[in-house]
Amino acid sequence: MDNVIARVAKAANLSPEVARKTVALIADFIQREASEDAVKELFEKAPELHAIVASGDKTGGEGMGFGLKGLMGIATGAMGGGGLMSLAGELMGLGLSMEQIQAAGREVFAYAREVAGDQTIGEIAASIPGLAQFI
């Protein structure tokens, strides 16, 4: 668990506490927005990401089933918002700049790719509109 947090802290020049919150928000976003099968596979291969989400503050969408999450995502997209924009807002609320958000996101996905593989991360990216351009 500390490995991914340390990597994000270093890559984005964040304190360990803010890096932990950042990783929790990104991993929770993945859990809420990505395909259920890909998330399950990711968390099986990277249980520390699941542990970070479980130990962090909850964000919007927790407790929703996959179908309801999908409907919420469609509704948010139709209103001009979006999951990525919401995540960026939450991360900015922690005090991160856009450059830090990008660095943190790239590091979390690099870690996830190392432990879960290209196929799983590809499925996650394909299931979240707009994500592929950032990872």
Image: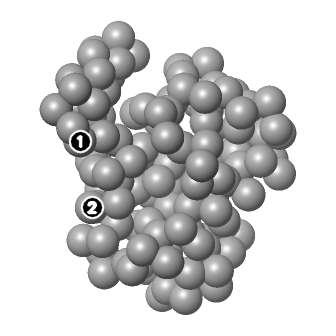
Say whether residue 131 is visible.
yes
Residue at 42%, 44% in the rendered image: 29
User: Hey, which quadrant is residue 103 in on the image?
Assistant: bottom right
Label 1 to label 2, Cα distance in Å? 11 Å
Q: Earlier in the sequence, mark 1 or mark 2?
A: 1
Q: Which mark is residue 81?
A: 1
**Vertical arrangement, residue 108 with respect to residue 17, above or below:** above
Point out the residue furthest to the left here: 79
In the image, 132: left or right of 31?
Answer: right
Instruction: Using the rendered image of the protein, determine whether residue 64 is visible from the camera's viewpoint.
Output: no
Residue drawn at x 56%, y 61% is 105
Relative depth, front residue between 43 and 10: 10
Kind of residue at disc 1: Gly
Q: Residue 76: image x %, image y %?
A: 22, 31
Identify the image's colour scheme: rainbow, by chain, secondary structure or one colour. Answer: one colour
> Does residue 51 appear to the left or right of 6 in the view shown?
left
Label number found at residue 89: 2
Which residue is rendered at x = 61% and y = 28% of the image? 126
| Amino acid type at image mark 2 | Gly
Measured from the top left, where is residue 91 in percent x and y? 34, 66
Q: Residue at x 53, y 68 (%)?
A: 102
| 5 over 75 or under it: above or below | below
